Image (cartoon, rainbow, N blue to C red):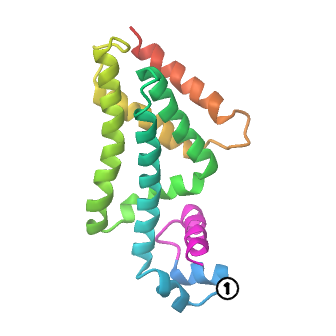
Amino acid sequence: MKEQMTEKAIELFARKGFKETSIQDIVDSLGVTKGTFYYYFTSKDSLLMEIHTAYIEKLLIQQEQLLEDRSKSVQEKLYSIVYSLIQDIGEHGQSARVFIREMRNLNDNDLEKVIPLRDKFRENIEELIQEGVEYGEFRDDLSVDIVTFGILGMANWSYLWYQMNGRMTEEEVTKVFMEMILNGLKK
């Protein structure tokens, strides 16, 4: 039931927004009582935090596995990371929407836990790009942190428009993004 409740909350938060969704909305949509909700979650805030934590921890695990692959070049690793973000948005677009859009509704204590995880994901990409600069795969005249934010912006905000069964697959979208990124970075 906890998983069903989380999935329903993600659906409602993505559609209506966190503030506009009540606990009553969640339980009514599942045909359960508020007591059932409180059996699994202490509050709507704790539910939002669980959604955020689960999402970023999953992305970090995927990212770190890709980064550890010594058989790939920096460009190939960057491609794999962008692809995994687009693929995840295709498969779990509502979770991505909640993760990106509803961060502003996390309380200060929860932000202190989530921000370092988000930062770690960004820092891993930044370090990868810096590695590409040092290996001569990428230009050295661009600001690595700004390039990183650009990549994350392109990939993350695709939750607004990317559809898994749309006219382009996640691989095709990734190829377009990487073409734009690498033609601006390649030496």
Of 32 and 15, the residue lying toward us: 32
Seen at 57% across and 46% down, the residue is: 89
In the displayed structure, does residue 60 sit left or right of residue 12?
left
The vertical placement of 15 against 44, above or below, is above
Q: Residue at x 36, y 43 (%)?
A: 121
Quarter of the image with the C terminus is top left
Label 1 sits on residue: 31
> Can residue 160 be seen in the rendering of this structure?
no
Q: Magenta stretch containing residue 35, yes or no?
A: no
In this picture, is 18 found above or below 137?
Answer: below
Q: Percent x, y for residue 146?
A: 32, 29
Q: Which residues are magenta?
A: 1-21
SS category of the residue bearing label 1: loop
Rendered residue at 59%/67% (across/down): 7
Dividing the picture into quadrants, the one containing residue 46 is bottom left
- Examine the image and state in which quarter residue 42 appears: bottom left
Of residues 54 and 172, the one nearer the viewer is 54
| Amino acid residing under circle 1 | Gly
Report the residue at 42% width, 54% height from top: 57
Measured from the top left, where is residue 24 in percent x and y? 56, 84
In this view of the protein, can residue 70 be seen by the observer? yes
Q: Quadrant of residue 36?
A: bottom right
Q: Residues within 10 Å of mark 1 (few under 14, many from 20)?
A: few
Vertical side of 181 occupied by 51: above or below = below
Q: Main secondary structure of the magenta part?
A: helix
Which is nearer the eye, 39 or 166? 39
- Horizontal and vertical percent position of residue 12: 58, 68
Q: In this picture, is 3 found above or below 15?
A: below
Magenta span has 14? yes
Q: In the image, residue 110 lies at what x, y percent?
A: 31, 66
Q: Is residue 35 left or right of residue 90?
A: left
Give the quarter of the figure containing the N terminus: bottom right
